[in-house]
């Protein structure tokens, strides 16, 4: 059974939300977005129902949620991330609207395992205390929520496309490797959860097929572009590259995250990969496929 009511997407002008809108439209869903910048609305496909509003203001949010069957949430890089998430959860609970969330969340079979993970995470990454709280708020809501705990996005590379095309892959990824997931796969699963009321509520890890080091990533780009791309993530100046490409709380979040990924990496768990494969009904897209698709799009202009 597929939902007929509109589905609301928050963050539709961002990396995750944009991919979710695309996946929903490919499934012929009625899509509504809550966008705060009217100028950015023009970038969205014309069939999308547009609501101009900010998560800070509950009235606009409530209006956007009217008549909606399910709502997708991605937490903005914002110092007030907990307040924004709480407002969203309360509005969805009041309207009886299912939440599908993609972001930071710790999954695990046992409470003890989750507690250990949460403690380790909070120690290594104090900035993640708020993000973990947001994930918990979503997971503990009364909306039959679906929480997708995603690993490092392959699409982060697009922020550094100019650097990569210039011959340097600047993201610091440990030699042990970092699990990287294609947002098209996250979006496919999110769209399924938004449109199928019978999609079981719960928290699911969504990962890519492998962990990649920065050297691996540079090699993939080099092969796809057929010219040298060297790994620059262990250069002293990697943070300066991030400061050129990003700003505000997103810059601070990325710097603190990548300091950890540079040192410790992010392993690929067999259980998480099996879960993602089960949700997709196929293997998740590989990094080689992602890089090839982007390169093809660049060549096509
Ligand atoms: N990057 C990774 O590898 C990774 C991995 C795991 C989890 N995550 C998590 O993913 C989330 C970021 O997702 P993303 O990359 O899609 O972010 P993004 O590209 O920065 O997009 C954020 C979206 O939220 C919108 N937004 C921001 N503040 C808003 C407000 N007050 N009201 C309404 N909309 C607002 C933005 O709108 P504007 O266009 O107007 O700014 C934009 O559409 C973070 O929570 C991060 O921790 C990231």
Image: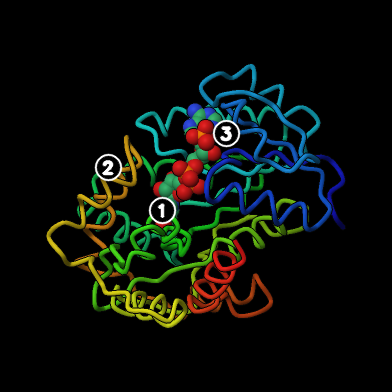
Say which element carries label 2: helix
Residue 36 position, x and y percent, is 57, 26
Q: CA distance from mark 2 to mark 3?
A: 26 Å
Q: Residues within 10 Å of mark 1 (few under 14, many from 20)?
A: few
The residue nearer to you, when weighing 154 against 190, is: 154
Q: Earlier in the sequence, mark 2 or mark 3?
A: 3
Task: Determine whether the beta carbon of the residue marked 2 sits less than 8 angstroms from the nearest atom of ligand 1.
Answer: no
Query: Residue under circle 3?
Result: 89
The residue nearer to you, when weighing 129 against 296, is: 296
Q: Residues within 10 Å of mark 2 (few under 14, many from 20)?
A: some
Residue shown at 29% from the left, 67% from the top: 168
- Look at discs 2 and 3 and give the one toward the viewer: 2
Say which element carries label 1: helix
Task: Determine whether the beta carbon of the residue marked 1 sits less than 8 angstroms from the nearest atom of ligand 1.
Answer: no
Residue 105 seen anywhere in this rendered image of the structure: no
Which label number is shown at residue 252? 2
Residue 129 seen anywhere in this rendered image of the structure: yes
Query: Residue under circle 1?
Result: 159
- Look at discs 1 and 2 and give the one toward the viewer: 1
Residue shown at 60% from the left, 80% from the top: 283
């Amino acid at each position: 059974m597929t939902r007929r009511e509109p589905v609301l997407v928050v963050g539709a002008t961002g990396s995750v939300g944009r991919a979710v809108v695309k996946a929903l439209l490919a499934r012929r869903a009625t899509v509504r977005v809550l966008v705060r910048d009217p100028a950015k609305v023009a970038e969205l496909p014309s069939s999308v129902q547009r609501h101009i509003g900010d998560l800070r203001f509950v009235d606009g949010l409530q209006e956007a949620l009217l008549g909606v069957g399910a709502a997708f949430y991605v937490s903005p890089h914002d110092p007030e991330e907990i307040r924004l998430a709480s407002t969203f959860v309360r509005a969805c609970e009041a309207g009886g609207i299912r939440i599908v969330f993609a972001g930071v969340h710790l999954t695990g079979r046992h409470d003890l395992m989750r507690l250990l993970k949460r403690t380790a995470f909070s120690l290594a990454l104090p900035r993640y205390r708020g993000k973990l709280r947001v994930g918990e708020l979503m997971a503990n809501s009364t909306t039959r929520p679906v929480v997708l705990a995603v690993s490092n996005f392959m699409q982060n590379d697009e922020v550094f496309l100019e650097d990569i095309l210039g011959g340097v892959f600047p993201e610091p990824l440990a030699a042990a490797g970092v699990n990287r997931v294609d947002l098209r796969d996250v979006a496919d699963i999110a769209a399924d959860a938004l449109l199928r009321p019978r999609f079981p509520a719960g928290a699911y890890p969504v990962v890519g097929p492998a962990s990649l080091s920065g050297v691996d990533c540079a090699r993939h780009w080099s092969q796809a572009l057929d010219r040298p791309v060297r790994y620059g993530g262990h250069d002293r100046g990697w943070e300066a590259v991030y400061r050129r490409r990003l700003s505000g709380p997103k810059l601070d979040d990325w710097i603190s995250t990548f300091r950890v990924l540079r040192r410790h990496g992010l392993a690929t768990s067999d259980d998480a990969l099996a879960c993602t494969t089960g949700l997709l009904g196929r293997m998740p897209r590989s990094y080689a496929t992602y890089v090839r698709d982007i390169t093809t799009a660049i060549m096509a202009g």
